Image (tube, grey):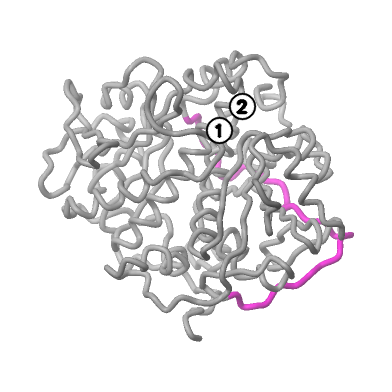
Amino acid sequence: MSASAPAYPHTPESGGEAARLYHAEHGCKVPYIDLSAPRPEAKSYPAAEAVPLPYPPRARTGFRADRPDGLGDLLALTYGVTRVEWGGGGVRAGRPLPSGGAAYPGELYLSAEFGLCHYLPSAHALERLNEADLRRQIVDALEAQPAERPRLILLLTSRHEANLPAFGGFGHRMQTLDTGVLAGQALALIDAAGAEVRVHTRFDEARLNRILGLDPRAESVRAIVTAGLGHDAPLPVPAFSTDPGANQAGIPRRIMARHTAADGFDAVSIPLPRVLEILETAAEEIPSDIRTGHGAEFASLDLYCVANRVDGLEPACYKRSAATGALGRVRETVDPRTLFPSGSDGELAHFQAACALLIVGDYEHGYREHGDRWYRMLNLQAGILAQRIGLSATGAGLGSMLRCDYQVKVADRLIHASPGRTVLVAVLVGLEHGVGRPGHRLLLGGYGS
C-alpha cells in the first residue's frame, strides 16, 4: 500500500470514527487525477490449473453452476473482455461495465461444487485454486446465511493499489463504488436467469480472506453474491421492447450495448417518461442483507434528478417520491449549473447531458449499527443503483456517464439535504453524441444463434 494511502480500510473497528476521518480527508473530493500513473499487472495465478471456458461466449441469460463450462457466458457478461476498442490512444480491451479511470481494481472469484476458482478475463478462463467444495465454509462466514446452500457463490474483492497511484486516497472510495457496479451487474444477470440471488455485505472479512489466501494489506473481499438454481435456456425477447419480459430477457444485449458516453451528449431534450422509467428501475429493492426503506430502523437511498433538458421539467433539482415515483421540485434549490466545478470536464458533460441523476444516502445512519464498514456498504449500494441506471438508460436508447467529480457541498445544497444525507454518485444521462456504439464485439448473439 502506498505511503500516502489512508489507514481506514485496514484499521480495527472504531465505530465509524476511522471512516469519518477517511471521508473528511480523502473521500469527499476527487483529487488531481493522474491517469498515466503506473498500474500493477492484472491478477493471475500461473501455478493454478487453467480451465478454459467456451469461446466466444454468448450474450444470453442462463447458467449452470455444476460445471465450469456452464458459467462462461455469465462470467464474460459480468466481468470479461467483451469488446476491443480502437482509438487515438491505441487498442484497449473493453469490459461490460464501467470503472473509475478504467482501473478495474476488482477481482472475481467463485465457489461451486467443482471447487474454488479465480476468473481471468484476459484469457476467459478459470484458475482453479482449490478442488474442494468450500461453499459451506463461505456461507458460515456470512452474518445473514441463506436457508439453503447456494449453487454458486461469487466473491468480489478489491486490489488496493490498483487505482491509488491515479486517484490517491480517493481510490478507496472508488473501489467500493466499483464493487457495487460489479455486484449490480451480477445481480441483473443472475436475476434474469430466474435464479434466487442476494448480495452480502456483512461477513467475517478476515475469514474469507484466509479462504481465498489473500494478503488483506493488498486485496480484500468486499462483497459476496449467492445464487440459486437458474434456467440454462435463452429467452427470445429483444432487449429494446415494451414486452413485460424484455427488461430481464434483454439484459445481456443491454450489457453489450452499454458503455460510457465518452464522446459526450447531444444538447437535446429527452422525454420525461424515459427519465421516470430509468428512476423506477433503479429504485427497485436490492436483494441484500441490508434493510432498505424509510424510518429510523432502515437504511435508505434517495434518487434526485437535476434536469437540464427534460420535456415537462424546468431546469431545477427534483426528488423522486419513494411512494409514488413522481418527481417533486426541491425547494430553495440553487443554480443546477454549479453542480460541477467551473471549467471542468464534468461541467461540460453536465451541460450537454439532459439530466444528472443523483444517488443520495446517509453515512451517519449506519455507523451506529455497522461501524466503519457501513461506509463501504453504503457506497456499494450506490454502485448497484448507478449500474442499474446505466443499463436502463441503454434500454431507453440513451447514453450515460458516472461522475464523482461533482462539488459535494454544492450538490448537498442543491438537494436540500437533511443533516447526514449526502450525494454519493452522479450519473449523467442524455442522447449520446455520434454513433454511440461500442467497439468490435467479441460475443455471439446468443438468441437462437
Above or below, 183 against 77 in this view is: above
Looking at numbered disc 2 in the image, what kind of residue is underneath it? Answer: Arg
Q: Tell me the tag on residue 43.
A: none
Percent position of residue 359, x then y: 37, 36
The reply to whether callout 2 and callout 1 are in contact (CB within 8 Å) is yes
Question: What residue do we see at 31% from left, 48% from top?
Answer: 280
Which span is picked out in magenta? 30-57
Q: Which residue is mark 1?
A: 377
Label disc, if present, on residue 373 of the rendered structure:
2
Where is residue 132 shown, x and y percent of the image?
86, 57
Horizontal side of residue 130 vs 400, given as left or right: right
- Disc 2 secondary structure class: helix
63 sits left or right of 406 in the view: right
Q: CA distance from mark 2 to mark 1?
A: 6 Å
Under tag 1, what secondary structure? helix
Q: Quadrant of residue 403?
A: top left
Q: Quadrant of residue 201?
A: top right
- 79 in the magenta segment: no
